[in-house]
Amino acid sequence: MRTPTINPLIKIFSMAAIMATGTFSVQSKAEEADRHVPVKVMSFNIRYGAANDGENSWKHRDYLVLETIKNYNPDLIGYQEALKFQVDILKAKLDGYGFHGIGRDAGTEKGEYVPLMWKTDRFEMLDSGHFWLSETPEIPGSISWDSSLTRMLSWVVLRDLKSPSGKEFVFANTHFDHRGKEARLESAKLIRRRAEEIMNDYPVILTGDFNTTEEGAPYAALCKAEGFNGEPLVDTYRAIHPTPNDQEASFSRWNGHRKGKRIDWILHSDDFVTLNAAINYTQEAGRFPSDHYPVEATVRLK
C-alpha cells in the first residue's frame, strides 16, 4: 500500500501554528506576571460613637462593625465619623493594618477623624498628610463657605509591595458637610484641583461620605469633565452598575432602608480599572453595624 505524502505547505503551516501557540503561551505568562494584584477597598461611615442612639449606640454594635470589616477583609479602609475611642478599638482589634488619622477640630485628637487603614504586609507608607476643606486648607480646624462643621481630608502615599514594579499611589478619605450645599461643591472642587496636581505622578483612590448624590454638582466636579482640564475620577459603583435605580441608598437608617441614592462613594483615577463594586448589607438579627452601609470595590492598576 502506498504511503501518503504530506504536503510541504501543510507541514510549514502546522509548524508555524505550533510555534505561534508556544509564543502566545509565553507571552500570556509574561503579561500575567506583569499584571497588578487587585486591591479590595472599603469606605465605612461607622457613625459618631458619642451619639445618643439607644439600642444602636456604639457599645451595642462595635463587635458588628469589626465583624463586617473582617468578613470583607479589605486591603484599604477609609472611615468616617470615627472618634478617638472608636479609633482605638479599630487599631487594637484589626490586626495587620497601618493607621493614619487625626481629629478634625484642631489637628490633634479632638473631634471626628477621617482615618485610613491599610494592610501592612501589602503596602508600605511613604508619606502622609491632611488638609481641611476650607479656603485655608493647611490651617487645622479651619472652616469656610456655608459649612456647618469643620471638615477635612486625610491621605497617604502607599507603595504596593505585591506590584511587579512597586507601584506607588495616593489613598485619600474625606467626609463632606451634611448641610452646606456651597461647602460640598467647593470641597469637591478643592479635592479635584489637588488630585489633578498629583495624578501625573500618582494614581489616586478616594473614599468618602459625600452627603450628596450623583445628580449633584459636587459629583460632577469630581467625576465629570466639567470645568477641569484633567481626567475625571471614576465612580466604581457606577462603573459596574451603569444603570441607576431607586434602591441604591447607602444609608441604612438602622432598619435596612434601601430606597434612595448613594452618598458614600469609592472613586479612583483612570490608572485603575474597577473589577467589582457593591453596597454591603451586613446585619445580624435586624441589627446593623451603622446607619450607613459600608461600600466596597475591587480595583486593579492598569
Image (tube, grey):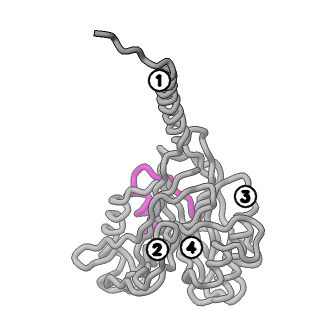
Give the left or right position of residue 189, taking residue 80 as reference: right
Give the crowd class for mark 3: few <14, some 14-19, many >=20 residues within 10 Å: few
In-front residue for pair 185/273: 273
Give the labeled residue for mark 4: 110
Q: Earlier in the sequence, mark 2 or mark 4?
A: 2
- Residue 198 location, quadrant: bottom right
Does the residue at mark 3 contact the one at mark 2 (Cβ under 8 Å)? no
Asked if one can make out residue 64 in the rendered structure from this viewpoint, the answer is yes
Residue 119 location, x and y as percent? 47, 50
Secondary structure under tag 1 reads helix
Residue sitting at 41 percent across and 71 percent down? Answer: 279
Picture coordinates of residue 228, whole percent (x, y): 76, 72
User: Residue 45's mark?
Assistant: 2
Q: Is residue 2 above or below residue 116?
A: above
Please tell me whether mark 1 or mark 2 is closer to you in this view.
Answer: 1
x and y, in percent, of residue 57 in the image: 35, 80
User: In front: mark 1 or mark 4?
Assistant: 1
- Tell which circle, 4 or 3, labels the residue nearer the N-terminal end: 4
Residue 85 visible somewhere in the drawing: no
Q: For the magenta stretch, what is the residue range?
A: 80-101
Q: Which residue is mark 1?
A: 10
Tell which circle, 3 or 1, labels the residue nearer the N-terminal end.
Answer: 1
Tag shown at residue 198: 3
Q: Earlier in the sequence, mark 1 or mark 4?
A: 1
Mark pair 4, 3: CA separation: 29 Å
